[in-house]
Image: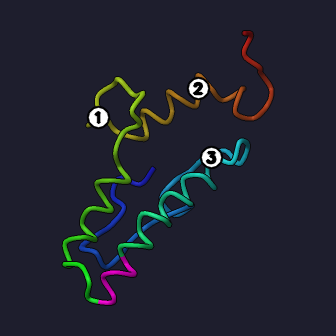
Amino acid sequence: MAKEFSIRERTILCGDAAHTHSSVAAQGLNTAVHDAVNLGWKLALQTRGITKPEILQTYNEERKLAPKWYEGDPTADPYVILGEISEKAGSFNIGLEFPIP
């Protein structure tokens, strides 16, 4: 995951430019769609002058939020967290391991 999703509202990352996921289970597509929806309505309203410029500042923080199930340190380095999660769930994510009910 990118450490920042926008820089001064001039460079904005979304989709594969902001996330690295396994192609299995459509994780990349899911996060890309969430990014696009979040950014799309903000850009549409901003370019029409309907919202204040500050609306684009919310994109960065909203997309960097930790998942609700995450109980770890929200300020932790996302690369370390991704490594830990990938190590635990990697085989399942690529279809080589299945959980036993």
Label 3 SS: helix
The dot on residue 27 is 3
Magenta extent: 43-48
- Left or right relative to 91: residue 8: left
Which residue position is annotated with label 1?
Answer: 74
- Cα–Cα span, label 3 and label 2: 16 Å
**Mark closer to the chain start, 1 or 3:** 3
Residue farthest along the bottom direction in this orientation: 48
Tell me which amino acid carries mark 1: Pro
**Badge 1: how crowded within 10 Å, few (<14), some, or many (20+)?**
few
Tell me which amino acid carries mark 2: Glu
Residue at the spot 43% in from the left edge and 32% down from the top edge: 81
Label 1 SS: loop
**Mark closer to the chain start, 3 or 2:** 3
The image shows residue 43 at horizontal and vertical percentages of 37, 78
Label 2 SS: helix
Tally of numbered tags: 3
Name above or below for residue 12 compared with residue 50: above
Name above or below for residue 74 compared with residue 55: above
Residue at the spot 51% in from the left edge and 53% down from the top edge: 19
The dot on residue 87 is 2
Q: Is residue 45 magenta?
A: yes
